[in-house]
Image: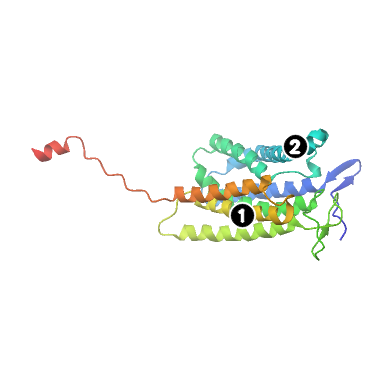
């Protein structure tokens, strides 16, 4: 299979397929989250006001983390730093840029919506958008493949020699399965007689997403195989998610009620 075209022209205008794919994934996330908020009876108008700024935060964060993780290359080729259409957007950097931006804007425009509740409602959205984005983003970008392979499923990517593991396709399948699992977990959490704490779904989704991020990097992407930045961040998120789930759902002893002032004196009189 020949490399997928990473750009095309409309007259003098150069259009990058990668950017169109990411734009579709971002718009899907926006509409799906808005729908989930509305269905849950939560404020949703703030998402439209915040959408562009969250994207800006995500792209900046994703690029900064990628550049820092590959600083030796970019010190030699600083002109490549802004060229995001050549590939190089870190998933963790995107979260690091988008989440603080979204938190600030939620507090500004929807203060009545609790942060934990907002994260629970957005968790399936992010997983679904990630699945879509893997196909419409990295799969269509320059140097989008993984390690070289001679397997039947190998694909050719622009900017890479030979056949490569189609990591974006594999990750899209993983994320789609995780999305379905998260929806089932959400359904079961709603049906519980004693509900778990807000934030449980969000941290569960983060845990499920972080585990394949580690093994994807280890088996298909990282050179050398162990202890690159993505693997380290993945392990940190796995540990943080488990700790958070234990902490927010730990049994809390009931606080003993204090007797009204003067009650003891009256009883003994």
- Relative placement, left or right, of 158 versus 65 is right
Image quarter of residue 19: top right
Q: Residue 203, percent across and down?
A: 54, 50
The one nearer the camera, 131 or 91, is: 91
Looking at the rendering, in which quadrant would you find the N terminus? bottom right
- Relative placement, left or right, of 249 versus 207 is left
Helix, strand or loop at disc 1?
helix
Which residue is the site of mark 2? 71
Label disc, if present, on residue 147 of the rendered structure: none
Residue 75 drawn above or below residue 153:
above
The one nearer the camera, 203 or 217, is: 217
Q: Tally the marks.
A: 2
Residue 60 drawn above or below residue 250:
above
Q: Is residue 199 visible?
A: no
How many angstroms separate mark 1 from mark 2 (CA)? Answer: 26 Å
Q: Is residue 132 visible?
A: yes
Image quarter of residue 55: top right
Q: Residue 216, percent across and down?
A: 69, 55
Name the residue at 40% across, 56% down.
Answer: 194
Looking at the rendering, in which quadrant would you find the C terminus? top left
The one nearer the camera, 59 or 163, is: 163
- Mark 1 closeness class: few <14, some 14–19, many ≥20 residues within 10 Å: some
- Mark 2 closeness class: few <14, some 14–19, many ≥20 residues within 10 Å: some
Which residue is the site of mark 1? 211
Q: Nearer the viewer, mark 1 or mark 2?
A: 2
Name the residue at 74% across, 58% down.
Answer: 169
Name the residue at 57% across, 53% down.
Answer: 207
Q: Residue 221, percent across and down?
A: 73, 52
Q: Residue 37, percent across and down?
A: 55, 48
Q: Earlier in the sequence, mark 1 or mark 2?
A: 2
């Amino acid at each position: 299979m020949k490399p997928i075209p990473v750009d095309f022209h409309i007259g003098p205008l150069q259009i990058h397929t990668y950017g169109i794919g990411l734009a579709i994934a971002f718009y899907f996330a926006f509409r799906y989250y808005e729908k989930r908020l509305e269905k849950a009876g939560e404020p949703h108008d703030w998402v439209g006001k915040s959408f562009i700024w969250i994207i800006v935060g995500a792209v900046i964060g994703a690029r900064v983390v990628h550049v820092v993780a590959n600083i030796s290359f970019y010190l030699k080729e600083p002109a490549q730093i802004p060229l995001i259409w050549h590939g190089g957007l870190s998933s963790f950097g995107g979260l690091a840029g988008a989440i603080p931006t979204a938190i600030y804007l939620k507090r500004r425009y929807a203060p009545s919506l609790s942060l934990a509740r907002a994260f629970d409602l957005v968790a399936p959205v992010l997983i679904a958008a990630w699945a879509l984005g893997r196909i419409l983003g990295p799969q269509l970008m320059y140097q989008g493949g993984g390690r070289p392979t001679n397997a039947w499923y190998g694909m050719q990517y622009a900017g890479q020699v030979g056949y490569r593991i189609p990591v974006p396709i594999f990750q899209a399948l993983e994320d789609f399965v995780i999305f379905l699992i998260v929806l089932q977990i959400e359904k079961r959490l709603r049906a519980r007689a004693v509900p778990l704490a807000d934030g449980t779904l969000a941290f569960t989704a983060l845990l499920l997403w972080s585990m394949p991020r580690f093994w994807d990097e280890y088996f298909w992407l990282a050179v050398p195989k162990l202890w690159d930045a993505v693997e380290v961040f993945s392990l940190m998120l796995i540990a943080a998610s488990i700790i958070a789930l234990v902490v927010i759902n730990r049994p809390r002893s009931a606080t003993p009620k204090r007797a009204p002032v003067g009650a003891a004196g009256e009883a003994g009189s």
